[in-house]
Image (cartoon, rainbow, N blue to C red):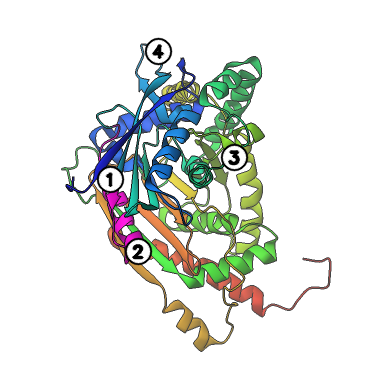
Amino acid sequence: MDSREEVHRRTFSAHGGTAPLTWGQLAIWKTIAWMGDEAHYFNVRRLVDLPEGVTVDGAVEAVARLVARHEALRTRWEAGAEEPSQTVSAEGTVDVLVVPVPLEGARESAEERTVAQAAGKLPGADGMPGRFTVFAHGDTALHIGMVVTHQAVDSWSMRVMERELRLLATGGQPDADAWQPRDQVAVERAPGGAARSKGALRYWERNLEKAPATMFGPSPQGAPEDPERFVRLGMDSPALAIAATALADHCRTSVSTVLLAATSAVVGRFAGRDSVVLQLIAFNRVDPRTDALVGSMTENALFTVDGVDRGDFADLVTRTHDRAMLAYQHARYHPLELDRLLDRLTEQRGARPDLGCFFNDARLQDRWPDTLEPLPTEPGAVERLRARTRIHVEGTWAAQDATFFAHTTYSPDSARFFVMADTLLLPRTGIEESLRETERVVLDAALRLAAAPTPPEGEK
């Protein structure tokens, strides 16, 4: 720590207690436990830009009030004989690191520091599940960096925290007491929650019984350890953004549905299958009370679609919408009950169902701004658009709990699309080809529709 950096400590006093885990907490608990020493892979980070006039003390106090307001930010989790539990501290301290930064390049410096912090292990010495850093010039707080374990939060939670930090730092107060993970536990463990879980698992069982036993094939056993076995490549593609928007408009659906349909088509082609099984990341905030909940609510949704290689991509988009809605409707369940279901299916089949392929739309808004340029139709303009696509390496790992993981994040003028895959099943060159194929499938479909005669009103 730089000698100019200081730790500011605040105390808190709030409600505390113990409880089982929510379904969302249980879901991520299993994954984090599987990652072991590499669990920092799941740390969630966000850099909050503060309004003008916020002092260092005001920013530190805002962090302390945020921690007091949300139980997930002062919770410890422990394994148990049957399932893990959580303990919420009623009293304690919050340590906030204050880091001086120059005005010029302040945000870049703060972002770099926050990224580095996210690569470290959580919780820290104080046992809290997050790290908060105030980046300041003199007595003026410019940014607050947040790094929190995924066990405590999901991406929606970070958005809630960002909004409330800005409000608290300027002297405001959130409207009402927030819904807490322990409140959510009570709902899920009630008879209505148990019935919902059973209904969701019946959906999983029906679809897994007719799903392919594997997508890309089982991962080779006994392969020598390779720190670059799992590779993630990223693609920045204005063409994909423009074409996906045009298709979404034509099909009267979301861009997310278009990207999911494209992923299904690409997985089907590379795996040589006409039926595709993907797990989706469901945020599960259908209850209005969970809008302001800071906690991990996400669970996996089971998405299956047939006929991914029929050639009519617009039709696949429509069918993808319907199948995705079913998947999300059945994504609230007790994860340990799902484990028992998978164990039973494994015993019946002699092999565990392959659920290693994923798609996650992590954008916080579905559409790009109106300033996104229109779809070009002249061949030269189309080729110039394709030429703007860039592909880069995002990272490599020795182990992951997925075979193929496609996800997208927001960028104001392009589609940021990523694929991570097991190179023993899909080589690095195949990962790059899958990204380009995703762009090609969507762009070619959009160009075909743009060239087609416009149907009479009401016949779309």
Return the residue at label 3. Answer: 327
Q: How crowded is mark 3: few (under 14 residues within 10 Å), some or many (20 or more)?
A: many
Mark 3 or 4, which is nearer the eye?
4
- Most extreme residue toward the top, as rendered? 81
The magenta span reads 99-123
Q: What element carries label 4?
A: loop
Q: Quadrant of the N terminus?
A: top left
Q: Which of marks 2 and 1 is nearer the N terminus?
A: 1
- Residue at 29% in and 34% down: 122
Q: What residue type is labelled 3?
A: Ala
Return the residue at label 4. Answer: 82
Tell me if I can see residue 459 in this picture: yes
In percent of width and height, residue 102 lies at: 29, 61
User: How far is disc 1 from disc 4 in space, using C-alphas?
Assistant: 33 Å
Return the residue at label 2. Answer: 432
The mark found on residue 95 in the picture is none
User: How far is disc 2 from disc 4 in space, using C-alphas?
Assistant: 43 Å
